[in-house]
Amino acid sequence: MSQWKNFSKGFIRENPVFILLLGLCPALGVTSSAVNGLGMGLATTFVLVMSNIVVSLIKDLIPAKVRIPSFIVVIASFVTIVHLVMEAYVPALFEALGLFIPLIVVNCLVMGRAEAFASKKDTGSAIIDGLGMGLGFALALTVLGGVREVLGSGSLFGFPFIEGDGMLVFVLAPGAFIAMGYLIPLNNMLKKKTE
Amino acid sequence: MAKRESTFLNMVLTLLIVTAVASFTLASVYNLTKEPILRAREETRQAAIRLVVPEFDELVMRRFMPPTGSDSLEFNLVYRGDELVGVAVSTYTGMGYSGRIRAMVGLDPEGRIIDVVHLEHAETPGLGDKIDKSRSDWSDQFRDFDPGARDLRVVSDGGEVDAITAATITSRAYCDALSRAYQTFIANKESIINREGK
C-alpha cells in the first residue's frame, strides 16, 4: 500500500465515523457546532498520532499479553496532556469540549489504530495512518457539526446567517442521530464514485 | 509484535516501566501547566466580576453560608477608596434542567441587582441556554431589579420575572440562584457593610 493511499484512506474509503462507525460517542456528543467538531477532531488527531508513534516504537519491547494495558496507559497519558495544555492555553475551547476530552481515552478509534495498525507497522507508516485517520475523523466531525449548526442554529462556524433559531432538534441529541443517518449513505455514495 | 516472551517477570517489568515513564511525563506536564491554568481560571473569575459591578480599586473576598443550600457563597466585596460600591456574589442553584447552574450576581450596597452573568451551565442548547448573555438579552431584565421590593420569581410562580419561552424550569432555577445570593446578602448585611469584618 502506497503511503498516499495509507494517508487518504481515512477521509472517505475507511472514514472512522461514516464507514468504520468508530468513536461515535464524541462524534455525536460534541458536534452541536462546526467549531466544536473541529476542535474535538484535532485533539483526537493529536492523541492518535502521538500514541501511534509511541506504540510503533515500543511494540517489540512489550510482551503480547500485556500489550493492551500498556497501550491504554500510553493513550491515557497523551489525553491527560491534551487536557492540561488545553485548559492552560485555550480555556474557551476547553470550556466547550472539557467534558469530552477524557472520553478520547475510550475512543475505540485510538485503541483500534494502536492495536490493528501501529503495533504491526513501522513508525513512518504509523504516523501517516494516525494523521490520515485523525484528519478523517476531524473532517467527519466538522461536517456533522456544520450540518447540525446550519440546520439547528442558522449559523456556520459561529457566523449567523438567519435571524433567530433554526430547527432546534438538530442541536439536541436526536438531531445528531438524524444528521448522522443521512451523512452515512452520502459518504457511501462518494465512496462508490471514487472506486 | 512481541519479540519478548510473556513471562511473569517480563510482564511485571514492562508494566512497571510503562507506568513509571507515564507518571513522570504527566507530573512534568502538570507542573508546567499549573500556573497558566490557575491564571486562566482567575482571569475568567475577574472578568465575570468586572461585568457585574462598577469600577473598583480594591477587592476583598469573603465567604458566607446561605440560609438554604449546601455550599457557602463567595462574596467579592469591591471598594472604591473606602466606600463599598458593590458585591459580586458567585452563586449557584441545583434546580437547573440539567445539572448545576452557577452565576455571578452584582449587588449594590442596598441589595439591588446591578447585573448578572452566568458562569457555568449545561442547559438545553437553543432553549435554556438563553440565560447566556451572548445567546439572548433575557437576563437584562435583572438589571436594576430590587429583590427587596419586587418578587424575584417567574411569573407563573406569582413573581415578576418573565420566564424564557419553553424553558420555565431553567428560568426558575436562575431566579433561585439569584435569590440565594440576595438572601445571603441580607442575612449577613451588617458584617458586609461594616468594613471591620474584612
Image (tube, grey):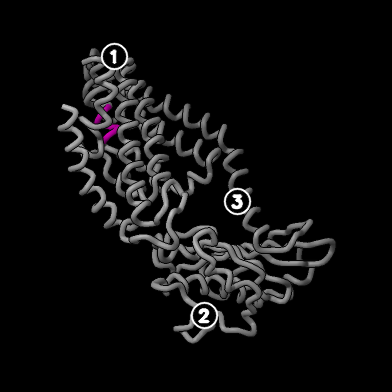
Residue at the outermost right position:
B81
Q: Would you say B18 lies left or right of B160 here?
A: left
Is label 3 in a helix, a strand or a loop? helix
On residue B153, the disc is: 2
Q: Which residue lies at the image location 35% right of the left edge and 61% below the top edge?
A: A168
Q: Quadrant of residue B6?
A: top left
What's the residue at 29%, 30% (across, down)?
A69
Asked if the stretch drawn in magenta spans residue B63, the answer is no
Mark 1 and mark 3 on one chain: no
Q: Which mark is residue B44?
A: 3
Task: Provide the chain ID for the residue under circle 2.
Answer: B
Three-letter amino acid code at the position of disc 3: Thr
Residue A158 against residue A49 in the figure, above or below: below
Of callouts 3 and 2, the N-terminal one:
3
Residue stretch in magenta: A109-113
Residue at 62% over, 53% down: B45
> With A124 as the anchor, is B103 left or right in this view?
right
Quarter holding the N terminus of chain A is top left
Q: Is residue A109 left or right of residue B86?
A: left
